[in-house]
Image (cartoon, rainbow, N blue to C red):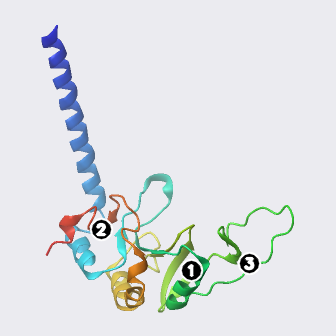
Amino acid sequence: MDKRNNERERSAAEGLAREQARQEAFWIRYLYRVNSREELKRWANKLRYMRFCRAYGGHSNDGDRLLAAISVPSRERLEAVCEVLGIALLPMRPRRENEAFSFFEIKKYPDLRQPGHAEIARVPVYVWVHRDRLTISVSDPDDRYSVKESTVSAVAERVEPLLRELADLLIDPPQNDRNCICPQQHPELFRS
C-alpha cells in the first residue's frame, strides 16, 4: 500500500514538474516572440527609468509598452510632477446632481481631468493618474501594440532626462510581475 502511494505521489510530482516546464517554455517563447533576448537586454541597459512591459495578451487588448510610475500621494505632488513633465492638468466641468462618475475624471481629484494622450518632450505618451501614482506609458506611435528601437531611443533621449529630475519619486518596478523587464524580475537581462 505504501509503495503504491509513493509511486502515485512520485508520478504526480513528475507530471507537475513536466507541466511547469512546459508552461515556462511557453512563457519564454512568448516573451521573446517579437523582440529578441538581445534586443530586450540592450533596451534594459539603455533605459534607466522606464521599463519594457510585455503585453499580457489574450483577450486583454493590451500591447507592449514602456512604462514608468511616479509616486503622487498628494495633489501638490501631482501638480509638481506634471509641471516638470510639461503635462497640463485640465479642469473637469462640475458634475450635476445624481450624475455618474466620468471615466475621464481623476477619482481622487474629481475636479481634474485625466491627462490621457499627451506629449512629454515631443514624445507621444499615455498618462493616467491612479490613487497614489501617475503612470506614463509609451508605445510605437504607428502601432500602439508594439515598442520599436526608435521608440526606445526617443524615450531615452527625451523623456528620461525629465524623469531623472523625479528619480526619488519613481516606483520601480512600475508593474511588479514577470511581464515587466526590470532587475527584480529579470536580473539576467541587466548584467553586462
Q: Which residue is mark 3?
A: 92
- The answer to whether marks 1 and 3 mark residues whose Cβ atoms lie closer than 8 Å is no
Q: Earlier in the sequence, mark 2 or mark 3?
A: 3
Amino acid at circle 3: Met
Residue occupying the point 29% across, 60% down:
31
Say what secondary structure mark 2 lies in: loop
Q: Earlier in the sequence, mark 1 or mark 3?
A: 1
**Front residue (pair 8, 142):** 8
Task: Tell me if 100 is positioned left or right of 39 in this view.
Answer: right
- The answer to whether marks 2 and 3 mark residues whose Cβ atoms lie closer than 8 Å is no
Amino acid at circle 1: Leu
Above or below, 167 relative to 172: below
Q: What whole-number distance in Å separates the C-alpha atoms at marks 1 and 3? A: 16 Å
Amino acid at circle 2: Cys
Give neighbour class at mark 2: few <14, some 14-19, many 20+ (Cα, 10 Å): many
**Front residue (pair 140, 114):** 114
Q: Nearer the viewer, mark 1 or mark 2?
A: 1
Q: What whole-number distance in Å separates the C-alpha atoms at marks 2 and 3? A: 36 Å
Q: Which mark is residue 182?
A: 2
Say what secondary structure mark 3 lies in: loop
